[in-house]
Amino acid sequence: MKSKEIKKKYIEFFKKKGHKEIPSASLIPENDPSVLFTTAGMHPLVPYLLGQKHSLGDRLVNSQKCIRTGDIEEVGNSGHLTFFEMLGNWSLGDYWKEDAIKFSYEFFVDVLGMDREKLSFTCFKGDKNAEKDKLSYEVYKELGIKDDKIWFLGRKENWWGPVGEEGPCGPCSEIFYDIGKRKCSKDCDPSCSCGKYVEIGNNVFMEFNKKKDKFVELEQKNVDFGGGFERICMILQNKKNVFETDLFKEIVKEIKKNVKEKKEKEIRIIADHVRSLVFILSENVRPSNVEQGYVLRRLIRRVMRLGKLLKGNDDLILNVAKVVIKEYKDFKELKKSFILDYLKDEKEKFENTLERGLRYFEREIDNQGKVLDKKFVFNLFASYGFPIEMTKDLAKERKKSVNEDDFWKEYRKHQEISRKGASKKFKGGLGDESEEVIKYHTATHLLLLALREVLGDKVMQRGSNLTKERLRFDFSFDRKLTDEEKKEVEDTVNSYIKEKLEVKCEEMDLEKAKKKTKGMFEHKYSDKVKVFSVGKSVEICGGPHVNNTKELGKFRIKKEQSISAGVRRIKGVLES
């Protein structure tokens, strides 16, 4: 079964079950400042999972594009990807465990025709904070599932959330497909990482709200199903890994045309990374040394490093990107010329970095012993992008060697530091909707309006990130703001606050909303949208807001800077 047919069948099945289709949201989260990218279909729905009413009702379905970078080192095996699509269906306080489990089972077995004997299901086994999930077990038994296909697992495997210290959470029930490998041990179960069981879906039952040290039942209990689209395609197309499916067939073929060395794992990594970076570039993210831009730059440079390792031609990354754009032509946001222009620019920058690295190598090599110092080797990798294999070849030419074990120890140490830094992003938790964050959400609307009034209508929002402490706002502009302009923007925002403007929300058809607002409209929206009006500011938005600008206090710009070509960033605070 082809991938497009699988996705179509999924959407049509849940539409027949009363769900309304919503478009895939941006890869840059609008309502969740705790993550760099949309990592699951539920991220754009945070306000509705927390109680806001969705304009299309309480049953929703879509296929959401996602980026996850937490296990980037696993990319290249059978199932891990950086960019992927997640099939999702939601009940916002409507149906509960019985319907959710039966819907998933019916879709996999009756619609897609999966062998029910190869499916396994997990339930939460309970602990001191929450009871054993007997209801899910009973539903599976009602469906005729044998006990040896139902597994009770603990909190690590079968509990979702909260993302931060507080917030919605609950037990989940995962669905696995047995690909036929022998058990690695007598204790092998779906939680094992040996690869026998492939997770293809997960029903999350959000029934609790964690408050400090206690779990309180939510008034609105939600179901959030997420299905791994690429993995489902792998199983239905009877392939050993996702890179053999029709989703990657043409991409992999193009890579092989452009390289001399045919190393399978490296080819898979290039396929994944080019697909990922094309979609990140489509979000108006530019390569940079911070946040989303840093991830993008890292992916581009990793592809180029691997290309050199495989003796690829100079245009490898550009040629593969063209195929990705062609294969995903249904995603109208993939603007070919824009994406290729930025790739060319970054390619040139990286080639210059490699040249500087070679000069550094030549300058330092005579000071090295017979075994190159691990810090020297790692610096070539981290600062100049040299793959370890490239450094080994250069060392061999000088009759020296590299201790790979030392290099990887240094690499893992660096990884751990990076991971600790990234984990701080999650402190605010999932979709932090504290009073402070809600204020900043409204303040961004006023800031955009003020920027347009001071700098002109060409200013467009490129992204935002909100925490309890500050707002961060990215916008299109081609030069540094003068001190006078920053002061004028600040004063303009504060004048709106002093006017005590009422914040109004209106639901309307998308076409009518586009006529009323000044946006770029590069992303898809539902047919019905919410439009927030604050004085002269009229914007399509799904986030929470204050009722009146008088609640905001005083706005102050703390910093204004460039983050990439043609994009500026303002960090601002609200003071009482």
Image (spheres, rainbow, N blue to C red):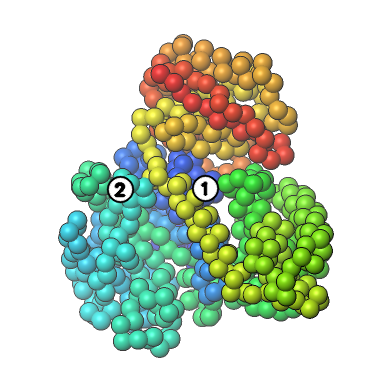
Distance from Cα at disc 1 to Cα at disc 2:
20 Å
Q: Which residue is mark 1?
A: 36
Structural crowding at the residue carrying mark 1, measured as other residues with C-alpha within 10 Å and reported as few (<14), some (14–19) or many (≥20): many
The label nearer to you, 1 versus 2, is: 1
Residue 282 visible somewhere in the drawing: no
Residue 215 against residue 544 in the figure, above or below:
below
- Residue 406 vs 196, above or below: the answer is above
Q: Residue 380: image x %, image y %? A: 70, 62
Where in the figure is residue 119, as x and y percent of width and height? Answer: 35, 77
Query: In the picture, which quadrant includes the C terminus?
Result: top left
Mark 1 / mark 2, whichever is N-terminal: 1
Please indicate whether residue 41 sits to the left or right of residue 398 in the image: left
Q: Secondary structure at mark 1?
A: loop
At horizontal 56% and vertical 14% (from top left) the residue drawn is 491
Is residue 438 among what the camera can see? Answer: yes
Which mark is drawn over residue 493?
none
- Residue drawn at x 17%, y 59% is 128
